[in-house]
Image (cartoon, rainbow, N blue to C red):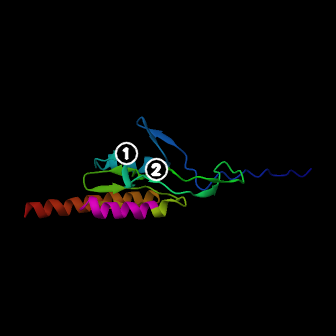
Amino acid sequence: MIRKRRRSKKRGPVRARRVTHDGIKFASGLEKHMYMALKKARIKATYEGETFTLIDGFMFESSSYERQTNGKRDMVDRGNKKILPIKYTPDFIGDDFIIECKGRANESFPIRWKLFKRYVNEHLKGVTLYKPQNQKECEVVINLIKEKRKCKTKQVGN
């Protein structure tokens, strides 16, 4: 008797497994790993501590005929309504750094990341961004932060 394998239905782009550690609910195992690495290195950072508004919301005052989001084929006027702002919440925020752990990015992430870089460039001078994509890169980030802090202490000491 030949058994047929059932194919599982694909559920969207990327789905990370949520993990809990120290009472904190992380969106992925990579974020948990980064948290543990920061803690071990005694580097202070808050997890999802702040949300930044990259583009303000606005009132769209024209008509916009589009198919309904529920999948119906009818074209309806989806204009004349408030458009929500584009916001971004990085994974970890320290005094002089921001870390975004990103294993596999969804399709909207690259443009949001570019907008966030622009925000940092205009509003958060002196902040360094790190974007590790695996556990090995998390360790590299820890070393880079330590190195940078060591250089700062040498400069202050001179």
Disc 1 from disc 2: Cα separation: 24 Å
In this rendering, is residue 145 above or below 38? below
Q: Residue at 41%, 65% (x, y): give it.
A: 114
Query: For residue 146, what is the image quadrant?
Result: bottom left
Q: Position of residue 34 (x, y in %)?
A: 40, 51
The kind of residue on which mark 2 rests is Leu
Q: Position of residue 96 (x, y in %)?
A: 25, 56
Q: Please give the range of residues in magenta.
A: 112-126
Query: For residue 135, what is the image quadrant?
Result: bottom left
Tag 2 or tag 1, which sits nearer the N-term? Answer: 1
SS under mark 1: strand
Q: Which mark is residue 35?
A: none
Q: Nearer the viewer, mark 1 or mark 2?
A: 2
Q: Which mark is residue 84?
A: 2
Q: Main secondary structure of the magenta part?
A: helix
Q: Residue at 58%, 50% (x, y): give it.
A: 15
Q: Residue lying farthest front?
A: 62
